[in-house]
Amino acid sequence: MAKRERVMRMSVEQPLWRALTAYRVLTMFYAVGLFATAYDSFARPWVAVTYFAVLFVWTLATLSRVSGAVHCTKPFLAADLTVALTGILLTRVADAGSRIDGGGPTLPSIWTAGAVLAFAIKGGWRWAAFASTLVAAANLVERGAPTRDTVHNVILVWVASIAIGYVVEVARASERTLARALEIEATTRERERLARDIHDGVLQVLAMVQRRGSTLGGEAAELGRMAGEQEVALRTLVSGGMVPLSRVSEDAALGALVRAVDEPDDDNPVGPVDLRSLLAPYAGARVTFSEPGAPVPLAPAAARELAAAVGAALDNVRKHVGADARAWILVEDEPDEVVVTVRDDGPGIPEGRLAQAEGEGRLGVALSIRGRLRDLGGTAELVSVPGQGTEVELKVPKVSTGKASTR
């Protein structure tokens, strides 16, 4: 299964842009409706008709502009706010003075708040404060003198826009943090996967070359010594981190979330595979394989990882007990999980030896066995009694909730 990373874009502010688009359309029709109901009261209705014609065309023509942060540029925001401010100032020209003094609405009415909210979503609370201050000044000029209703509306728009702008800034910071956390998690999991592969192959070959070189002596001993040095260096890399963390893309500011995904190769099976077929090659003169009489279906990724964990357990038996050690593999097909037990007849593991091995960078049990099962949402239990051998019990749920199966 080939593993690669891709960037999936998500943004908590995108729903705000969609809501703003709907708000602008609805409030435009609301402003036109207010004018239509009071048409006879206007001193110069043709001024209002001209303005509403421009507002109608502008609102519908700029729907794509307020659909996302990319298209909502600074020039557009300036032009949009200019339309709102012009409508506020034209109210005194179009409407009768008595209606204005009586607290009548401005021509754009609450449509003006949409222009201010666009500033808030695009640039945060500072941009919102700038736009709402200009709207407040225009309202005071239109009224001629500050009244209680005017001050109340101005403060309401000012506070609401700044609050929304602040929330947008917090949401963007949270998205960047989440993107960084997901990238670190993906990098860590890739490091663990590579560490398991290295342990299962390269490290064991280097250890074997070192042992055989020491036995043969001469030039082979020097080769064995060099292999031992490389094994120590590689174990240090495995335990300390092999994959450098890449810098989070600038797209994180738009809500880019890095997610590791496993995509099956074209030649890999799509449906479940029989676990028995993957474990059967381990059987031999010194290894007894006991299986159910029926297939044991598992997802391809889960079956391969479980088989690799069994192989790692048998490698530990050969390495620490000896080539003549006997081992037994037992497969149990439970209703909700598959249980594989690997047991040997060795002397057992002394207490504290596993923790010491992890500290020395020998991560066979930690990564090759427990790490694999953890990724599958399963567990690996190791029971060892001095003088009575070691038993490793591997449990994998048939419907895996682990990250290895959901990536």
Image (cartoon, rainbow, N blue to C red):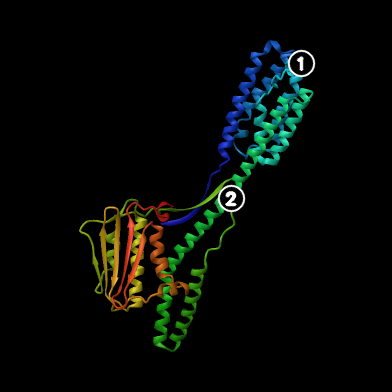
- Judge the density around disc 2: few (<14), some (14-19), many (≥20) Cα neighbours within 10 Å: many
Front-lying residue, 226 or 23 = 23
Amino acid type, mark 1: Gly
Q: Which mark is residue 176?
A: 2
Q: Is residue 359 visible?
A: yes
Residue 149 position, x and y percent, is: 71, 25
- Name the residue: 67% across, 12% down: 39
Amino acid type, mark 2: Arg
Q: What is the quadrant of residue 70 in the picture?
A: top right
- Horizontal placement of 186 versus 393: left or right? right
* Up-down relation of residue 42 to residue 403 (above or below): above
First in residue order: circle 1 vs circle 2: 1
Q: Which mark is residue 97?
A: 1
Q: Quick one: which residue is furthest to the front in this view?
A: 148
- Judge the density around disc 1: few (<14), some (14-19), many (≥20) Cα neighbours within 10 Å: some
Q: Secondary structure at mark 1?
A: helix
Front-lying residue, 380 or 188 = 380
- Name the residue: 66% across, 41% down: 124
